[in-house]
Amino acid sequence: MPGKTLGSGTYAIVKEAVHIKTGKYFACKVINKKLMEGREYMVRNEIAVLKKVSQGHRNIVTLHDYFEVRSSALHPCARHGNLLMQTAHNLYLVFDLCTGGELFDRIFRRLTPTTISDAAELVRTVLQAVVWIHDNHIVHRDLKPENLLFRSKKEDADIMIADFEICGTPGYMAPEIFLKSGHGKPVDVWAMGVITYFLLCGYTPFDRDTQQLEMEAILKGDYKFEPEEYWMNVSGVARDFVKQCLTVDPLKRPTAHQMLQHKWLSDDKPHFVEDR
Ligand code: ADP
Ligand code: MG
């Protein structure tokens, strides 16, 4: 199948696609409906949510179109004129193409924090978008660096929230998800704590040898700002931001709106890596 693969997950492959009439590039999320059998509501949910948030906020990816084909024959996608071949089992979601890659890769390639000029700035931008989502009565539920994409390759490119759906990723999941006691807005604040921790030191707070141990650590809120060599340049106020987000009890966890007022984000001069 022609077209560069941009990424893939459990149910979907995301491919680069060209609109033939305009030559414009898009990202096309190809969802395998066979794999989704019995869980189609998840896709419907993603579409419904995307319709609601699309074009509403500068830091949320825009859904342009979506379509599916019911016949079993293979034929080129006429409606969008792109290079993909459609089959009966696929559903296509067409998004603005983000060419700057995932935040995950920038962290992983250690492009941060030295070349992402300001971690607090980045966290503030994402958190502002989360506040906006929450104000619209939507919970993302799967915030993580793989779902935060840069609009372009530029160092100061806009960061975009992608992938609105219902399943989560263990390392970023809040205690109440495991306890099945709640899936509300506080889960996104928890995830912001994990993302910020990751951004500050380059590894995640609850990484353990097995998923069972990871889950136990999350339930106890068992993490440390260690090893010291990775944290010595991170100020107390930045650590406090992480600590507040990682409040185990969702009822006691501050809201996204409250976290936006945190000193680390509201100060003119963010307290981050002072001399690196
Ligand atoms: P999944 O539900 O399978 O996690 P995502 O929507 O997160 O699917 O997409 C998987 C990956 O594809 C992302 O992590 C990202 O690397 C890439 N991707 C998704 N949307 C876009 C986009 N609009 N532009 C560029 N790459 C994208
Ligand atoms: Mg994803």
Image (tube, grey):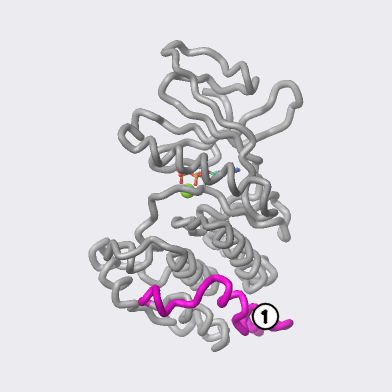
Question: Does 191 sit left or right of 3 as displayed?
Answer: left
Q: Residue at x 58, y 72 (%)?
A: 257
What kind of residue is marked 1? Ser
Q: Is 249 contained in the magenta span?
A: yes
Q: Position of residue 230 (x, y in %)?
A: 50, 79
Q: Residue at x 30, y 67 (%)?
A: 208
Please indicate, yes or no, whether residue 100 appears anywhere in the rendered image: yes
As drawn, the residue found furthest toward the left would be 212
Residue 203 visible within the image: no
SS at circle 1: helix
Q: Main secondary structure of the magenta part?
A: loop
Residue 133 locus on image (x, y percent): 57, 58
Q: Residue furthest right?
A: 22
Report the span colored magenta. Answer: 248-276
* Residue at (40, 72) in percent of width and height: 205
Check if residue 145 falls in the magenta segment: no
| Location of mark 1 (residue) | 266
In the rendered image, the vertical position of residue 129 relative to residue 238, given as above or below: above
